[in-house]
Amino acid sequence: MTTSILLLSLAFVAWAGLHSLLAAFDLKSRARRRFGPGADRWYRLAYNVISALTLLPLFLLLAALPDKMLYSISSPWNWFMRAGQALALLGLLLAFLQTNPAQFLGLSQLANDGSNEAESLVIHGFYCRVRHPLYFFSILLVWLTPTMTINWLLACILITLYFYLGSLHEERRLLAEFGDAYADYQCRVPMLIPRPGRCVPPTQFTDV
């Protein structure tokens, strides 16, 4: 089991490192210098495709390595966990739709030179309750698995840690882009754990 844990950890760190490197502004700037301004048109789409394809070996490794059962929730309690996963998946989809999906996927950039890639600060829907609802619902989705093994527990821990660190990295970028408006948003809306019954009205950010 020690070998499995080590291999999974190394594979995940390698993927996270590649994902972070591709997301870095410096690498995009180098691509622009190397291939010209037209690189902006394809960069986001290429980033998503590479991230998805390099994630597949992690799932294959997770399935292939020796594993050990920790617990398995029996009926009817596992139905509640599956229902929670279904709600988390629905929340993930709705939060994604509340952004600009075509821009997020890199499709809208194909229509021009990538100049429309500038983001707007999304503060409606789930985003008025938690700053990173995509990460929040993803964490719920992985942890509400009724059957837990050692390998999957490690995967859940690594995924949660990656989302937390990714949130911090994204916060720095958004602060640099939106300045005081995002700093005010940070003060009013929690980062990863929503506050029930608390929603910041979008009119409080009309200066964005």
Image (spheres, helix red, strand yellow):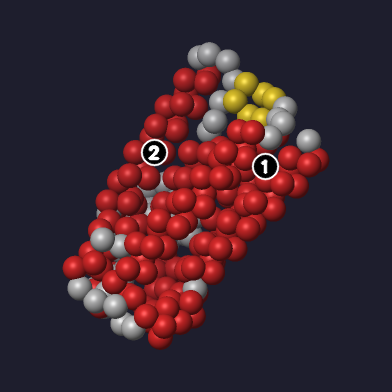
The kind of secondary structure element at disc 1 is helix
Residue type pointed to by label 2: Leu
Which residue is labeled 1 in the image? 154
Q: Is 115 situated left or right of 15 in this image? A: left
Q: Position of residue 107 (x, y in %)?
A: 26, 61
Question: Residue 156, relative to residue 53: is it above or below?
Answer: above
Residue type pointed to by label 1: Leu
Q: Is residue 118 visible?
A: no
Q: Earlier in the sequence, mark 1 or mark 2?
A: 2
- Nearer the observer, 99 or 111: 111
Q: Residue at x 58, y 50 (%)?
A: 160
Q: Position of residue 4 (x, y in %)?
A: 74, 40
Which residue is labeled 2 in the image? 89
Q: Is 41 situated left or right of 67 in this image? A: left
The kind of secondary structure element at disc 2 is helix
Q: Residue at x 24, y 76 (%)?
A: 113
